[in-house]
Amino acid sequence: MSTLTFNLLLNAAGISPASTRLVRHQDRRGSAYDLWRAKNGSFERYQAIQSKEVFDVGDWLASFVATPFNETLFVGIYRVQGMGVVADGEVDPLGGHDVSGLHEYAIDRVDALSDYAGRLVIGWGDGYRSWLQRADRQDKPIVELRKTINDPPFPGFDSFEHSIRTLVTVPHTWRAALSAVSGVYLLVSLRTGKQYVGSAVGVEGFWGRWVAYAANGHGGNVGLRLMAEDDYRVSVLEVASSTASEDDVLALESKWKEKLLSRKFGLNRN
């Protein structure tokens, strides 16, 4: 039995694999998958800005993102129409750093294979570092075609971690889970590595507390007034019992501050 491959789909859509670049977006600074899920143009902006000349005008781009489970998910077909320079003062949609003067491609999304976007998973192979490949030389096997576009399942409180800057991209089902519980969380500066231990109580739980950081950059804490130049990775240290009082949660917070020495070496000031 022959294996179904991505190039079969390209040919059926009238797109030459010889003119197509397979692009797999996976970034250590954050999640390209989350940018795509946001559906606000940030993914397209991220893809268009490159530090090197990686595309040719006229190229077809078959774009993929790495999911939270490291799958290679197809998200659309694009056409490279031109290349320019990023204007002064522009920032990267994922990392938030200045990208002035980098290459900026004019890339249009096309309707070809749009029914497969968010549902088709391919096997990329072992060469994950080779994020840009020629389709005619790398005919990728189709691993799965899902019935619908679904949020990935919530990974659990122990495994959840996310960038504060991109909280808007967290799936709604995950937000509900994080809003339902209180407890102690950890923020780690992605610029300095310094830690901040905090607690979340109230009807919006962890989610409500973190949204405050995303909104104003500090959530009322003096040690965290760095968001203009920094970002934080947030994770859950401990989920409080459903019967725990606010004082109980604050006691847990103090315990974690002592364990992690976040008052002496981190960003806690109290």
Image: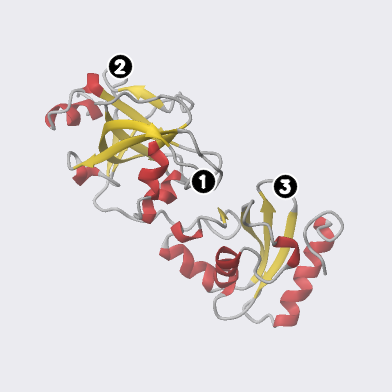
Placement of the C terminus among the 4 image quadrants: bottom right
- Residue ID at (37%, 53%): 37
Q: Residues within 10 Å of mark 2 (few under 14, many from 20)?
A: few
Q: Which residue is mark 3?
A: 193
Front one among 225 and 118:
225
**Residue 13, quarter of picture:** top left
Front one among 208 and 121:
208
Q: Position of residue 183 (x, y in %)?
A: 66, 70
- Residue ID at (41%, 24%): 53
**In the picture provided, is 133 more to the left or to the right than 183?**
left
Which mark is drawn over residue 89?
1
Q: Position of residue 190 (x, y in %)?
A: 65, 47
Q: Which residue is mark 2?
A: 137
Amino acid, disc 3: Gly
Q: Is residue 5 visible?
A: no
Q: Residues within 10 Å of mark 1 (few under 14, many from 20)?
A: few
- Mark positioned earlier in the residue sequence (1 or 3): 1
